[in-house]
Image: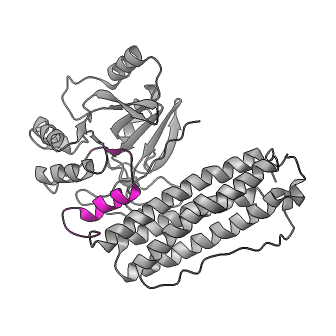
Amino acid sequence: MQSAYENYHKGKVDFMKSQTRENLMRSFAGESQARNRYTIAASAARKEKLEVAARVFEFTADQERAHAKVFYDLLLPSAGQNIAIDGNYPIDLSDKTLDLLRAARHNEYQEFEHDYAEFARIAHQEGFDLIGGQFELIAQIEKTHGDRFGLLAELLEKGTLFGEDNRDLVNCVRAAGPDYIFLTGDLQDQYRQTPRSYSVSLGRSLAEIAPTYFITGNHEWAFPDVPGLKRELEAAGVTVLSNECTVLERGGGTLVLAGVDDPNGYADQKTPEALAEEIRSVFGDPFWLLLAHRNNYFERTYSRLGADLVISGHGHGGLIRLPFTDGLVSVERSLFPSYTAGFYEANGGKVFVSRGLGNSGRTFRLFNRPEMVVLTLRRQ
């Protein structure tokens, strides 16, 4: 069996006799238990009709599964053996979601501040620096989990988790703790005749959480006075990118964020190619993201612009998702579309496509959950 971690086991001591080997097993056991605890907690949250909390527990459970796999793969030299360990593992039994959120926050911070910090120290001491780096990386992710659980517990305790006017959605976004929020079009729905006030109200609420950026989708252009919508969103604190770019700065680093209007916009609007050329002429060869609503334009157009990542929507996940497909029907009513959900590559470009949150017209979803996506960029 080949492993991505085959060079991780060369250290100052024999890996098979090391403390790091036992710590990896403790970590695998802990992450596996955490996954099950959060799955059980999600069921408890649903019994209290707290769907937001249930989704957060399930999202985190899946991440714990991924962490467990990392630790398990790092134990490859011990394949076929048993490893005896001792350890302390929490018993968080409660039928109250608030109690479960508080316990989850405590446990995640325990892993971040103590367990994985100590395991990383020992790994470096034993000469397993690459394994130590994995402990440190996952520790940072556990801190994010703890922050998210803590914020959700605070919202629930204050009684601000539910309400009208998109408060469920807004609280989900707030609980995710984003640095930036991207809206990739279709806040309006031509079939439901969404009032402009709906989009502006949502934009204002999101902009109070983090800097929020918006591009138009095809549905916005089915309404009159798109410039008026843009002006009202800007007044609400949302940055509208109309075939233009801006610079984002964080932690001493910068990237360029660009956004294009939907092709249903004005016939004489700036082309994506012209925007890409402007970016190169001003910034040279920067790391840049492109917000572009239409997933089905990626292969033929957006993938060729030189963006490091394109972020799109439009496809609604292919509406009906079947095994081994990207969905059954495109929004243009073609069969078996591609580029409908997740990451893809073409022509040297990369795209992430969100399934989005809603439907439009006489459509429905099957095996195709709506989603609010959290993307994390890490510097290599």
What residue lies at 38% left-to-right and 22% top-to-bottom? 276
Look at the image and give the residue range highlighted in magenta.
161-185
Quadrant in which the C terminus appears? top right
Q: What x and y, as percent, mark residue 11?
A: 85, 46
Q: Quick one: which residue is furthest to the top in this view?
A: 281
Above or below, comparing residue 80 to residue 258 in the picture:
below
The tally of labels here is 0
Above or below, comparing residue 172 to residue 315 in the picture:
below
- Relative side of 92 to 69, left or right: left
Residue 100 in sight: yes
What residue lies at 73% left-to-right and 61% top-to-bottom? 72
Front-most of 294 and 72?
Answer: 72
- Relative side of 31 to 303, left or right: right
Q: What x and y, as percent, mark residue 368?
A: 41, 62
What residue lies at 34% left-to-right and 61% top-to-bottom? 172
Q: What x and y, as percent, mark residue 235?
A: 14, 40
